[in-house]
Image (spheres, rainbow, N blue to C red):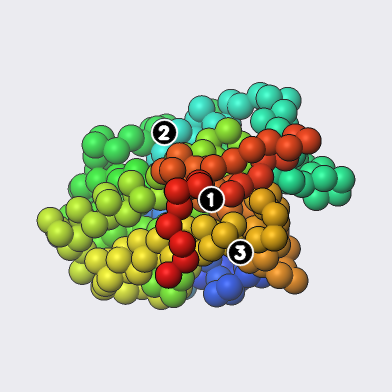
Amino acid sequence: MDGHADTSSVHRIEYPVDWPPGHVASYLVECEDTLTLVDAGMPGPQCESVLRGALADRNFDVADLDCLVLTHPHVDHVGQVGTVLDEADPTVYVPAGVGDRFERDLDDLETAVRETATAAGLTDDQLEGAVSMAVESLRRNRGLLPPERVDHWVREGDPFEVGGTRVEPIHTPGHQADHCCYHLPESGVLVAGDMAIEPFRPVALHAGLDREVDEAIDAFYAALDRLDDLAETDDPRRVLPGHGPAHADLAGVVRRDRESLDRMLDRTVEAVRNADEPPSALDVTEGRVRDRGIEYIVAEVVGALRHLESAGRLESETVDGVRRYSLPEDASPAP
């Protein structure tokens, strides 16, 4: 091998998940004598068996892994980190913001999410569920990915080498605040995690209902700008996402995601315009998901409403602790 990872030395590993499109992918990369795993699937014995089987198919064991590179700390991307750390001694690369996030005081997180969720209109079981989900997710994820085992906190503009191959991290927040894609310029590969997914735009979770929810939509647009720049200057021949198929259309998928965000914001304005009375974020969310759960969509809706208010397309008034939205008096009528 010539020291650069080409598409023939990058092997996709798919783990089952319970949401569309039914899988999450990690990638096994062979570079010279260095074996690297990018992302680590879901927790649990079934996904552990998938990982072990994929390695065995190529005559490797978990102990053979030299490097572990993570795109972001969502559970379906860090689930088998413990398996790797228990049996191998890899050099571990993780986006820099994750370290600070994992140090977050749980009581402060609970307070912040409770304030945001209450202002969004959540009450009773929905409110307590949102708070519990945020706290338990942080507790679980920092258990799956022990910060003390991280060797390199990766920052954009700070490339590193794995097995003689240059890796350029690109900070791509919006879906998750610390998310990084990894560009391998010599081989024309972009390992994209939960960005640049061909079948659909990932939801703008960013930091959930934590205080950073105000930044979610702007952060997502900034991530798309960075991927657009990459497509224009050094268009990867192969994009390897965490969900959906590998593809070769970074520019097209970025354009699709930008248009999807634009439409989502426009639909949010129309939901406010068409409401009988100024709606809360919960009202807008329930109109969007109908008979499905709100758990993940509500954060995107809150982020969208905050973005639209900041842009002057909406205004808000807090009534009995709930933030309600309306169009400015000088807003243009619906087309």
Q: CA distance from mark 2 to mark 3?
A: 42 Å
Element carrying mark 3: helix
Quadrant (top left/top right/bottom left/bottom right) for the N terminus? bottom left
Q: CA distance from mark 3 to mark 1?
A: 10 Å
Label of residue 274 in the image: 3
Cβ atoms at labels 3 and 1 below 8 Å apart: no
Q: Please name whichever residue, 319 or 98, is drawn nearer the observer in this view of the structure.
A: 319
Quadrant (top left/top right/bottom left/bottom right) for the C terminus? bottom left
Label of residue 96 in the image: 2
Q: Residue at x 68, y 25 (%)?
A: 108
Q: Amino acid type of disc 2?
A: Ala
Q: Amino acid type of disc 1?
A: Leu
Depth-wise, is mark 2 or mark 3 nearer the camera? 3
Image: 9 above or below 97? below
Depth-wise, is mark 1 or mark 2 nearer the camera? 1
Q: CA distance from mark 1 to mark 2?
A: 39 Å
Rendered location of residue 145, percent (x, y): 57, 40
Tell me if 151 is positioned left or right of 205 in this view: left
Q: Name which quarter of the figure residue 17 lies in.
A: bottom right
Residue placed under numbered mark 1 in the picture: 327
Q: Amino acid type of disc 3?
A: Asn
Tell me if 84 is positioned left or right of 10 in this view: right
